[in-house]
Image (cartoon, rainbow, N blue to C red):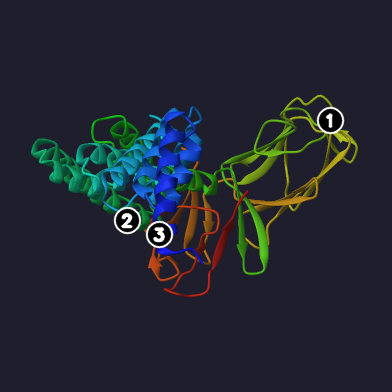
């Protein structure tokens, strides 16, 4: 077993050998020998020298971290290693917007700089990481009163804006719930414009712009738009056609039928006095009744079976489900049309197309969605389930077209 004198003089020999290795430039061997000599601070100093001479930034980071680990806590070498590693982390993060991964490194660098007595550099790092509390603490430690006051006033300004925007998003929720969706969409669009404007200014308030934009796009995607409205009434699925006339065509009109036999605009259905009539729109292949081309207007009376372009069957009959309306069967689809105001007298509702095509429900009596009473003129969204009593079963449900 080595005696005390062997260990003592062995460490002395190791220290002498470490100094010799350092003089000849063998820093790796010098650090190892300083460690054997129980001189951790000297070992850390040499490891720092290795880091300074390294060209690969990632390798330098490792040397700085190793020096910090070797050096006694709170020693000059320990603090120097922390400072160098922190500054290198900031340099590697770059000047661009800090990513979620890089933010962790920047925050770590800020804490190290703060700990080693570099509060101004720490404040800059905290600012890059978006840690306003850390930035304020570092500025206070640095005694930079002017920047601290500016930061606090800016944060108060942002907080006021943020609270105001939170209140406005709650207002949007209320507008959507009670049926004023057009106003809700307008409020969202206005809020997005304000966010885009302020995000480029001096007080760029951080908000989740993406979620607001998704909400606005979601409202647009769920809009019920004229002229065809699909509804579920009880167990029945009905396609209501709004408007005072219907044009059937291949690529234009109210109802479109994909068939080369049909012209772009082929047939018009409308009211003439009290009668519902049809008129061929000078189509290429004509409209036939029992094989004879229609000329002029023709009343449907109790029902009419036609051929569009000699190929596509069309059946028009008075509706039994909705008095005064007609049913149209074409290309495997069935439609219900009033050719005038679309009243649903069983529920006290009327459907109208707004000036922007958004379908509105006019309720002559209270209408509810769940426990929320709708306004008298509700802009409709796909998924709306309207009841005539609060919390009651839906009388009518609107689905996407």
Percent coordinates x, y for residue 377 in the rendering: 40, 53
Q: CA distance from mark 3 to mark 1?
A: 107 Å
Q: Which residue is mark 3?
A: 5
Q: Looking at this view, is 300 or 385 the one in front?
A: 385
Instruction: Answer with mark 3 or mark 2, whichever residue precedes in sequence.
Output: 3
Question: In this rendering, is residue 216 above or below 286?
Answer: below
- Residue at x 37% of width, y 49% of height: 39
Q: Nearer the viewer, mark 1 or mark 2?
A: 2
Q: Quadrant of residue 284?
A: top right
- Residue at x 47% of width, y 42% of height: 62
Q: Which residue is mark 1?
A: 260
**Secondary-structure class at tag 2:** helix
The answer to whether the residues at label 3 and label 2 have Cβ atoms under 8 Å apart is no
Q: Looking at this view, is 288 or 83 the one in front?
A: 83
**Secondary-structure class at tag 1:** loop
**Secondary-structure class at tag 3:** helix
Percent coordinates x, y for residue 143 in the rendering: 10, 41
Q: CA distance from mark 3 to mark 2?
A: 80 Å
- Residue at x 61% of width, y 39% of height: 245
Q: Which residue is mark 2?
A: 170
Residue furthest to the right in view is: 291
Question: In this rendering, is residue 219 above or below 250?
Answer: below
């Amino acid at each position: 077993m080595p005696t005390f004198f062997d260990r003592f003089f062995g460490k002395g020999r190791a220290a002498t050998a470490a100094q010799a290795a350092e003089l000849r430039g063998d820093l790796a061997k010098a650090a190892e020998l300083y460690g054997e000599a129980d001189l951790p601070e000297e070992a850390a100093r040499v490891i720092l020298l290795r880091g300074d001479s390294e060209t690969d930034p990632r390798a330098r980071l490792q040397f700085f971290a190793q020096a910090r680990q070797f050096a006694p806590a709170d020693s000059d070498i320990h603090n120097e290693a922390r400072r160098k590693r922190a500054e290198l982390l900031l340099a590697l993060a770059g000047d661009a917007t800090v990513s979620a991964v890089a933010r962790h490194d920047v925050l770590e660098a800020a804490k190290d700089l703060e700990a080693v007595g570099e509060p101004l550099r720490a404040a800059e790092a905290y600012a890059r990481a978006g840690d306003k509390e850390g930035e304020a603490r570092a500025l206070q430690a640095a005694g930079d009163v002017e920047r601290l006051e500016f930061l606090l006033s800016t944060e108060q300004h942002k907080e006021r804006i943020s609270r105001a925007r939170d209140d406005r998003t709650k207002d949007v929720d209320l507008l959507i719930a009670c049926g004023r969706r057009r106003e809700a969409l307008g409020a969202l669009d206005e809020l997005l414009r304000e966010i885009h404007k302020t995000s480029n200014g001096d007080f760029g308030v951080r908000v989740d712009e993406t979620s607001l934009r998704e909400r606005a796009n979601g409202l647009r995607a769920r809009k019920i738009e004229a002229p065809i409205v699909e509804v579920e009434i009880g167990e029945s699925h009905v396609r209501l056609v709004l408007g005072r006339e219907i044009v059937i065509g291949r690529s234009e009109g109210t109802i479109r039928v994909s068939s080369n036999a049909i012209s772009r605009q082929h047939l018009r259905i409308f009211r003439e006095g009290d009668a519902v009539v049809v008129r061929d729109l000078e189509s290429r292949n004509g409209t036939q009744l029992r094989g004879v081309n229609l000329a002029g207007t023709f009343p449907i009376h109790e029902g009419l079976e036609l051929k569009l372009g000699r190929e596509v069957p069309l059946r028009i009959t008075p509706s039994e489900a909705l008095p005064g309306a007609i049913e149209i069967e074409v290309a495997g689809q069935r439609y219900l049309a009033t050719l005038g105001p679309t009243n649903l007298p069983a529920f006290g509702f009327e459907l109208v197309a707004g000036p922007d095509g958004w379908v509105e429900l006019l309720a002559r009596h209270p209408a509810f969605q769940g426990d929320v009473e709708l306004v008298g003129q509700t802009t409709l969204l796909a998924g709306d389930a309207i009841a005539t009593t609060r919390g009651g079963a839906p009388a009518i449900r609107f689905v996407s077209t």
